Every structure is written in C-alpha cells, then in structure tokens.
Image (cartoon, rainbow, N blue to C red):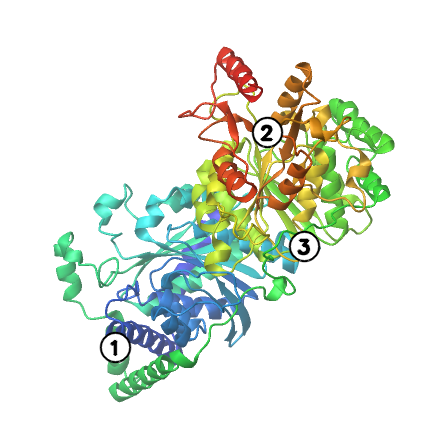
Amino acid sequence: MHINNWEERQWISQNFENCIAEELRKEELLRIGDLMLKCENFDKFLSTKFPTLKRYGAEGAESMFAFFSELFEGAAEKQVEEIIIGIAHRGRLNLLTQLMDFPPVHMFRKIKGRAEFPESADAAGDVLSHLVSSFDYKGSEGNVHVTMLPNPSHLEAVNPVAMGKARARAWSMNKGDYSPDERSARAGDSVLNVLVHGDGAFTGQGVVWESIALSQAPHFRLGGTVHLVTNNQIAFTAESSVGRSSTHCTDIAKAFEYPVIHVNGDHPEEVVKATRLALAYRERFRKDVFINLVCFRRWGHNELDDPTFTSPVMYKEVEARESVPRLFLDRLVEEGFTTEEAVKEQLQKHTEQLNNELKKVDSTVPIDISHRGRWEGFKQAPKAIESWDTGVATDLLRFIGAGSVKVPEDFDTHKHLYKMHIDSRMQKMQTGEGIDWATAEAMAFGSILLEGNDVRISGQDVGRGTFCHRHAMMVDQSTDHIHIPLNELVEEQKNQLEVANNLLSEEAILGFEWGFSSENPRRLCIWEAQFGDFFNGAQIIIDTFLASAESKWLTSSGLTMLLPHGFDGAGPEHSSCRMERFLQLCDSREDQTPVDGENVNMRVANPTTSAQYFHLLRRQVVPNYRKPLIVVGPKILLRHPKAASTINEFGPGTTYQNVISEEHATSSQKIKKVIFVSGKHWINVEKARDERGLKDSVAIVRVEMLCPFPVVDLQAVLKKYPGAQDFVWSQEEPRNAGAWSFVRPRFENALGVRLKFAGRPELAWTATAIGEHHTKEAEEVINQTFA
C-alpha cells in the first residue's frame, strides 16, 4: 500500500494470489531439495576437513539457493542474457561451488594457503570469502551468462559497483538505454542486476540508500534490480531490536515505492514463488523489487564465534531446530517424491566428489582468469616506464574543436555561450593559439570517440562544469532540449559521449563508475568531483576497489578521477584534493629499488597545461593496459593564459611530459638553486623569481607525474644543472599535506638530493578561510622558497 501507482498495486495483488496458488512440479521440488542438500553437505564437509575455517556458511539460510536456482532459470525465460551479482560473504562459497561452476579444488587450494594466481600474475589474491566466478547457466528455456563480482569486507560497498557494471554491460551489448531501437527498447533489456544483502548491513550502511537512489536516475538506471535480503535476524551480535529503527529490515524500499515480498525461509518452495513474482514484477514495470528472506543463522558471525554470549534466548531456539534442508527433504520423502535411500545415495555421491576434489589440490595449478572476454588483448602494465605517442593530426583536432561547439540551426543557444564559448573556441581553432583546458578536453574526447572508444563523464554538474568551463552539453533556452555536439561529429557516429550529471552522492557514484570502467577497456570513464576533497565521502571505494582491485582480484580499471585543487582562499573544504592520501595509497617504493614502472597500482598526475591534460586523457585509452588515474585538477588554470597551449603541442609525436624544465637564455651552469614544484603553484613561484631578478641563477622544475615517480626524467633534468647547490621543494599545501612526504624520501634515495621544504606549516585542516591569513601564508611560502 506504500506504492502510489494504482496499476502496480493492482498487478501485485492479482499476481501474488496467482503465484501463491501455483504448485511446484515434482522435478522442481527435487531440484531444490538436491541443491540444498549439497549446500548443507558442503558446509559440513568444510567443517570436518577444516575445523578452524571461517567459511561464513549458509546454514539456516539454505533456502536462498532456491532463490538462485529459480532466478537463473526464470531469467533465461525472460530473454535475460547477462546476470551481474553483487553478494557479500554469507553463503558465497556454497553458491560458487554448487551453482556457479567454481571448481572446489581451487577453493581447497585457497584454504590450504596455496597461491591464488599464477606466478606470472602481478597480484597477491584476497581472502576466501571474496572468490568469484563467471559461467554460462544452461537453462531449459535458454542460456544466461552469470557473473559474480569480487567484493571487499566493507558490506554493501559492492552494490553500486555491480550496478555500474550492469549498465556498462548494456552499453557494450547495445541494449536498453543504449539500443539504437529507441521505440521498443526498455531499460533492463537483456541485463539483470542482482544484489544480495544481509539484514544488519542493509539497514545500517548509507551506501544502500545512495545506491537505491540511483535506480531510476537517468544515466544510472538499470530497469530494475532484484534484491534478496538474507534476513537471519541478527548482524554480528546485534539483534534487530538494536540493529534498526524500522519494523522490517527492508523498510527503506518503501521510501522509493518499491514492493517488498516477505517470505519464510523454512519453506523453500515459497521462496521459489517469491522469486517468480519478483522477476515478473521487474519484467513488467522495470523497477527494483525486494525479497525479505526471513531465516536464521546456525552459528555466530563465523563458525568459530559463540553467539550464546550475547543472544542466549535466540540460540536456544536455533539449537533446537532441525536444518532447513532436512525438514524439506523429510516432507518430500513423506509425500512420496523421493526416498530416504535416494537422499543418502545423493549425499554419499556428493561427499565422494568433494573428497576427490580435495585429493587433487597438490596436482592442480592456479588459473589466470584476467583479461578475458572484452578484455582480450589487454595485459597487466609493464614494470618499466613507457612513453606513448598520444598526439593527433592537427587538422583533425581543428575539425573536432569546431565540431564540439556546433549546434543545429534552430537551436536556441544561451547568448553568453555564443561569445564566450562558441565564438571563442572557433577562434582558437583558426589561430591554433591559446587553447584552454576545456577545449583540450573536448579535443581529447572527440579524438577518442573517432578512434573507436566510448567516453563517459560523471559527476555533479559535469555537463556545464563546476566552474562553468566545459559546456559539453548545451541546453536549448526555449525547450530545455539537451544537445551534445561531440556525439554528432560525423554522420552515423558509432561511439558516443555520455554526460552523466548525477545526484549528490560520492560513495555510490564512484562505486558505480568503477564498476562501469571495469566492464570494457575501450571506454574512457571519468568521475569529476565538484571540488577535490569531496571524494572523501567515497573513501571506502577508493581503498577497497580503486587502489587495490588489481592486486587482490586481477581486475583492471582505467577509471579517471578529476579532483579540482588549488589554494585560493576558498577555505577548508574547497581547496585541497588531499593528494597526499592518494600518494600514500600508491605502492611506489620509497627507496626506488627498483624504480617505479607502469605497474604501480594507480597513477597520480598534477598537469599544468591544457596540452598535458589532453595527453593524460588519451593515455588512458591508447596503451594495451589500464590503470586508475588521479588528476590533481585545476581551478584557476582552467582559463589562465600560462596554462594554455598551442595546437602543435597536441600534434603527432607529442606525449605527456612527466617533468617540465625550463630553457635558459644563458648557460645553465650559472644555476645555483633548483626549485621543484607540482601544479599551479609554479606560476606564483615563477612570478616571484622574475620579480626578484633571479632568472639566471634559479631554475624551476615542474613535476607533472608524481606516481609512478619519474626518476629517469628527474635525473636528466639534474644533469642540466651541475652547479646547483640548493634544492627546494615548494608547495602551497601544508607540510603534512601535498606531495612533500611522498617526494622527499624518493629524491633522497633515488636521486641523492636532499630537499629543503617551503610551504605552509602543519595544519589540522587543509586551508584557512580568512582572507588576510591566506594572503600572509602565501607570501610566507614564497619567502621561504627564495630564502
């Protein structure tokens, strides 16, 4: 009754009654019984062979496998070709081995501490309860490909990741919102997203709300996710009376007017019916639907934990209960569908299979599961630094630049944009001078599209840009119609730019975009923060996916994060992108033995010109490997003349420069001091140096790539200044922030250079909000630099 749509309510009422009245066939009941029997036996097998193992079994919630069995079968009937599953630890091992073709021998190898990946793989692996599988389910009505995603132990964090991958899969298949057949196509065609939650985490984690809030949003909708909440009525030790403020753990669904089907986990056949109803609703209305599977947990949070410490009354009830599979099979025996002898025979046969798998542990080698399917032809990044030609023919760039501001004749363009955006860009294309940040970005996007790759940029206000600089999408002033010029550069353009203005969320959005980027390497995926430090709402995604996914799971991603950064008096929350946090997460070695290669876990760059930004973006798609990229993005550099570039700096043979040094009119032998900077601070330092008349004795070097640390490039620069005796690292950030803590040991260990620090003193916050203080601090930084 919480659903306002009368048609939906009527449909649910009618179909619920029909579903309840339907009886399951004998073969369906036997299939459920056999599956649950094997799942229970698998748990018992593990407890016998590995008594100290934390397996997070499904005991008490075995009827969840009736859900999965019906889900796979029913999805194929509804012409679903792909299922993307996000699930936490509870019952995961059972699902993998009993339904998803994961070889038990590889699980046993993992339990015994053997390597998860081949020695040739640059990866370490993860815990047992994060294993994955991808397989083809062969159903009676057709086949469906099922993919279980890797997940971290941060519960519910996988939700938006699975959602992002599901939508990206639809794009790769040209289905749903990406179908060329706009009239008949519907969001959710061919691709189904399934999320499995625990009752405690589902009611407690904020990312749940953020993710569901995306479910019907443009550029994020999936045409309905099927949610299963494994409601064992207790979290770690918190029972529902202290674990939530609502009656049901699924009550959050009411805020979005999504239906909830409550079902008793003691009755697996009812779970099948609930699953059928959920799939039918999703097929009809293309909205999310929730199943609240009310069940119990046989043991504690893990099998070594004693739940009677905190829930003695509940566990007296649990201990007195027979298992769900046993009760169900007893009913089947009683009703004549099977016999006790047949059950024992099945049990014995399954145990023999598991024993045989266990015997093969020593003779089985790990399998490389990376870079398959759409990632075919890609590889892990090399251990050396590489330089890629990311330049583009200048005539093509002029064409793209002009096309990026082309609008239909009857389009009512904002008057301000005619002069400041359209006419200005056309003039830049004609002269080849003064190419600003937004123009460079448009040329990068356009060239990537024309080379056969898609582009997606997501964030709050990305269509216009936080600083009103991008205007990748234009809005008709009379009709509100949106026009994206880069999608109409040529007739029947195959590859597209998706501009995804999104809701005010960070964790769910970044998780969504990471999942999106992991699905297909031939797609540039970007998330732009409104201001750089807004990423901190997504720290869980950064730590557990962005920085570590490849090392843990051999899962690659080329996700690019644009984080506006710069100290200009804007205060604590609008100044710093906290680059120090990302640098701390990098697996770059302080001693630089060996020196960094492209195989660092992520790249951190601080470009100072529009051409540099152009090459950074193109470098995310040109190589045959992918790495996340953190761009310490500009604010004032977006329009600053010193950050503008000429068309030749984008042309053939050009590339990203990890280090930019100056060309000196006089001999570089006269240079006595070298000032190293990173980012837009270079402009202030250069101005101060020239005003002091020190141009002939002081050199400024811009470190444009922080990770991988450019040892070889810096060695070449230092050779230019054999007479230098004073080396300074100057930054506008406080000493306990910025790049200082990262670069200092690397300069000393790899280059033999002891840097002096010039910058703000240690601060508990990032930047002052008091104008006078900001100005005074900025002056002091410059004075320190030239002391």
Q: CA distance from mark 3 to mark 2?
A: 39 Å
Numbered disc 3: secondary structure:
loop
Residue under numbered circle 2: 725
Q: Position of residue 557 (x, y in %)?
A: 56, 53
Mark 1 against mark 3, which lies toward the viewer?
Answer: 3
Among numbered discs 3 and 2, the one appearing first in the sequence: 3
Mark 3 against mark 2, which lies toward the viewer?
Answer: 2
| Res 336 quadrant in image | bottom left
Image mark count: 3
Which residue is located at x 56 percent, y 38 percent? 502
- Looking at the image, residue 235 lies above or below residue 55: above
Q: Is residue 741 left or right of residue 524?
A: left
> Mark 2 is on which residue type?
Gln
- Looking at the image, residue 228 lies above or below residue 205: below
Among numbered discs 1 and 3, the one appearing first in the sequence: 1
Among numbered discs 1 and 2, the one appearing first in the sequence: 1
Q: Nearer the viewer, residue 572 or 89?
A: 572
> Mark 3 is on which residue type?
Pro
Residue under numbered circle 3: 623
Residue under numbered circle 1: 331
Q: CA distance from mark 1 to mark 3?
A: 60 Å
